[in-house]
């Protein structure tokens, strides 16, 4: 065992908490992870959803209902839960960012 690993094992300080990460979760994955649809149903709905042209393209929940995988009321209830439980982080696109430089303000001088 290396000295660095041995030193860390004997260190009484707690390990730092892992950093939070942003992970995109789509509604179909949400239904899959809640065991409301199977892998096969999810993949079928995804294939139909992404292969549909503009006029026939429906939201994934509507595609799942149209295929008979879940009832509309179940999808609507789960959609409410999905949107209420999700933490929203807004990201400003580059084109909307301020182009003004941040002024150089000295720190610690009074």
Image (cartoon, helix red, strand yellow):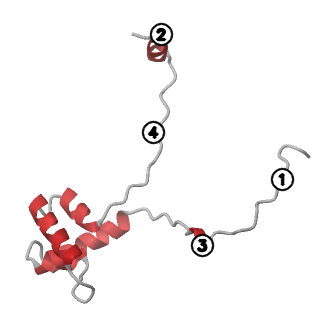
Residue bearing the label numbered 2: 3
Q: Are marks 2 and 4 in contact (CB under 8 Å)?
A: no
Task: Tell me the distance, in whole angstroms, between the alpha carbons under discs 3 and 4.
Answer: 32 Å
Residue at disc 4, secondary structure: loop
Q: Residue furthest right?
A: 110
Residue bearing the label numbered 1: 105
- For mark 4, does the 10 Å Cα neighbourhood hold few (<14), some (14 to 19), or many (20 or more) residues? few
In the depicted structure, whether residue 18 falls above or below residue 61: above
Screen quadrant of the N terminus: top left
Residue 18, disc = 4
- For mark 1, does the 10 Å Cα neighbourhood hold few (<14), some (14 to 19), or many (20 or more) residues? few
- For mark 3, does the 10 Å Cα neighbourhood hold few (<14), some (14 to 19), or many (20 or more) residues? few
Q: Write down the quadrant of residue 98 in the picture.
A: bottom right
Q: Nearer the viewer, residue 94 or 73?
A: 94
Task: Tell me the distance, in whole angstroms, between the alpha carbons under discs 2 and 1.
Answer: 43 Å
Q: Are marks 1 and 4 in contact (CB under 8 Å)?
A: no
Q: Position of residue 61 (x, y in %)?
A: 22, 75
Residue 95, disc = 3
In the displayed structure image, the side of residue 76 where residue 92 appears, left or right: right
Residue at disc 3, secondary structure: helix
Q: Are marks 3 and 4 in contact (CB under 8 Å)?
A: no
Task: Tell me the distance, in whole angstroms, between the alpha carbons under discs 2 and 4.
Answer: 24 Å
Task: Tell me the distance, in whole angstroms, between the alpha carbons under discs 1 and 4.
Answer: 32 Å
Task: Tell me the distance, in whole angstroms, between the alpha carbons under discs 3 and 2.
Answer: 49 Å
> Does the rendering let one see residue 73?
no
Q: Earlier in the sequence, mark 3 or mark 4?
A: 4
Q: Position of residue 68 (x, y in %)?
A: 8, 76
Q: Earlier in the sequence, mark 2 or mark 4?
A: 2
Q: Nearer the viewer, residue 105 or 95?
A: 95
Residue at disc 2, secondary structure: helix
Q: Earlier in the sequence, mark 2 or mark 1?
A: 2
> Does the rendering let one see residue 70?
yes
């Amino acid at each position: 065992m290396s000295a660095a690993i041995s030193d860390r094992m004997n260190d009484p300080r707690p390990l730092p908490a892992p950093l939070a990460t942003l992970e995109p979760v789509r509604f179909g994955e949400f239904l899959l992870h809640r065991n409301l649809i199977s892998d096969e149903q999810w993949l079928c709905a995804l294939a139909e959803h992404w292969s549909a042209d503009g006029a026939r393209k429906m939201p994934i929940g509507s595609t799942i209902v149209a295929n008979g995988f879940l009832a509309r009321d179940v999808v609507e209830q789960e959609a409410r839960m999905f949107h209420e439980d999700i933490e929203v982080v807004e990201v400003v696109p580059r084109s909307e960012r301020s182009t003004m430089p941040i002024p150089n303000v000295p720190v610690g001088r009074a």
